[in-house]
Image (cartoon, rainbow, N blue to C red):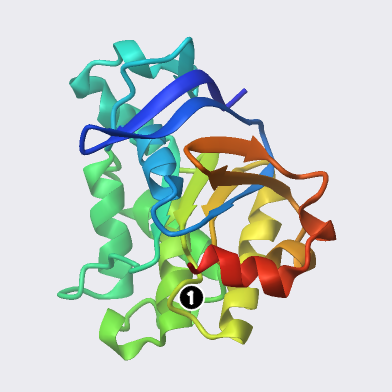
Amino acid sequence: MLIDYKKANIYQNDLCVLHDVDFHVDEGEFIYIIGKVGSGKSSLLATTYCEIFIDEAEKVEVLGRDLMNLRRKEIPALRREMGIIFQSFQLLHDRSVKKNMEFVLRATGWKKKKEIDERIDDVLDSVGMIEKKDKMPHELSGGEQQRVAIARSLLNKPKIIIADEPTGNLDPETASNIVTLLKNISQTGTAIVMTTHNMPMLDKFPGIVYRCKDGHLYDVTKDYNKLDLTEDAEEENI
């Protein structure tokens, strides 16, 4: 089990946004987290990489680590085993695509130039961006920047990728291409956990679905595709 939460309470600014959370992620799973703005989706994701800490739970484990007893100096090692993707891409705009990748690898302990260069080429090729490695971020489209962000998340061969609204700033066609890419990655064994308001994606790319609603997290995998996705999309954006 890559993520195993039992009866966890998740707080944001001293307010408990999610109560008694049971949340489980295993190898190769493709998981959506849906819900209205402010329902706790991003807060849940932030607990997995210790941006938000959980103090009340029966069990909170991520990649074999007990997060309730994890020391701060151990957090970087945890994050090195994860890939994290944001809606805003968060690329360094003062350096090229390749230099963005190199910065991450060197920061996570890679030292040999040949190995660094080979790994950068491997991940950029896997997302169709090898020809853009010398471009600056501002020279890329939104979809291209998100592909680079996905490539960056793959650098250290993560067991899990956490993606917070990865298609939120993209047009429908580009968004579909990005989710296709993430779905393909999950089929190699890396688990994907992503928040989204893009309800039609759930029908096009089926996966496990959790919903944040009224302070609780529900597994709605069995019935989400029976919903009227148009009405549901309207509810998600309230």
x and y percentages locating residue 146 in the rendered image: 44, 71
Q: How many labels does the image show?
A: 1
Which secondary structure lies at badge 1?
Answer: helix
Categorize mark 1 by other alpha carbons within 10 Å: few (<14), some (14-19), many (20+): some
When the figure is inspected, residue 84 is found, relative to residue 128, above or below; the finding is above
Q: What residue type is labelled 1?
A: Ile
Tell me if I can see residue 198 in this picture: no
- Give me the residue at 54% from left, 61% from top: 196
| Quadrant of the rendering where the N terminus is positioned | top right
x and y percentages locating residue 89 in the rendered image: 35, 67
When the figure is inspected, residue 92 is found, relative to residue 103, above or below; the finding is below
Label 1 sits on residue: 130
Picture quadrant where residue 148 is located: bottom left
Tell me if I can see residue 38 in this picture: yes
For the residue pair 83 and 113, the one nearer the viewer reads as 83
x and y percentages locating residue 116 in the rendered image: 35, 53
x and y percentages locating residue 7 in the rendered image: 51, 18
Q: In this view, does 75 lie to the left or right of 73?
A: right
